[in-house]
Image: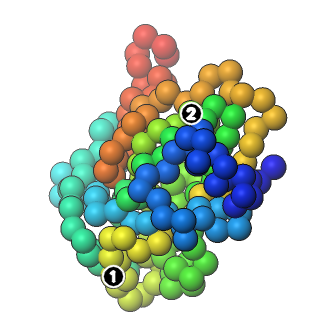
Amino acid sequence: MILSDRTLKELIEDNKLIIKPLARKQIQPASVDLRLGNSFLKIDENMMEVMTLEDEIQYHSIEKQEIVIPPNSFLLAATREYIQLPENITAFVEGRSSIGRMGLFIQNAGWVDPGFAGQITLELYNANRLPIKLVAGRRICQLVFSKMDKTAENPYCGKYQNQKKAVGSKVFQDRENRKTEM
């Protein structure tokens, strides 16, 4: 069940759902708008010949109020907001239609597990042939919340828990890469 603005306001007022900082105008009929932060990561293409699922990826960290994404380029960005989900609510990250119509694809694997806490790292891809300039503080995506049928038996406590700023891939930490578990 998708949560309504009324339910979202109640959860926020009761501190069961935490979104900070948050202005009331960010709460939409069935979602909450999130804004772009000022933390970005760009893959350091000069430090690697190829990316693998087993090796740590090198990133160049950028902290700016404005950033330009060149055509056909990829960038990680953090939301300004810190969120904390209860153990019975999950969220879907959706790009804003107005921004998608400019050719900017916004993703975060699309899913936020119950129990997650932290800033959300967004994956941004400029599919256009023109550069796109982004400014921190602008609404960039929205979270759609859904109540689960039961509280999660194992709420999220993974490698991205409590992340601050944009965080690069930690796929190299997956259990499949540990020699003792192969």
CA neighbours of label 2 inside 10 A, class few (<14), some (14 to 19), many (20+): many
Q: Is residue 105 above or below residue 98?
A: above
Query: Between disc 1 and disc 2, whose residue precedes?
Result: 2
Q: Toward which corner of the image does residue 160 lie, by quadrant? A: top left
For the point 51% across and 41% down, the residue is 84
Q: Please state which of residues 57 and 80 is positioned toward the viewer in this rendering.
A: 80
Observer able to see residue 35 = yes
Percent coordinates x, y for residue 174 in the rendering: 45, 29
SS of the residue at dot 1? strand
Horizontally, residue 104 falls left or right of residue 40, namely right
Total marks shown come to 2
Q: CA distance from mark 1 to mark 2?
A: 33 Å
SS of the residue at dot 2? loop
Percent coordinates x, y for residue 96 in the rendering: 57, 73
The amino acid marked with disc number 1 is: Lys
The amino acid marked with disc number 2 is: Gly
Q: Label 2, on which residue?
A: 115
Q: Toward which corner of the image does residue 57 lie, by quadrant? A: top left
For the point 24% across and 71% down, the residue is 65
For the point 61% across and 78% down, the residue is 97
Q: Nearer the viewer, mark 1 or mark 2?
A: 2
Percent coordinates x, y for residue 148 in the rendering: 76, 38
Q: Is residue 115 above or below residue 127?
A: above
Kindly give the residue lying farthest to the left in the view shown. 46
Q: Please state which of residues 4 and 114 is positioned toward the viewer in this rendering.
A: 4
Percent coordinates x, y for residue 52 in the rendering: 38, 42
Disc sitting over residue 162 in the figure: none
For the point 33% across and 52% down, the residue is 166
Which color scheme did the rendering employ for the protein?
Answer: rainbow
Q: Label 1, on which residue?
A: 133
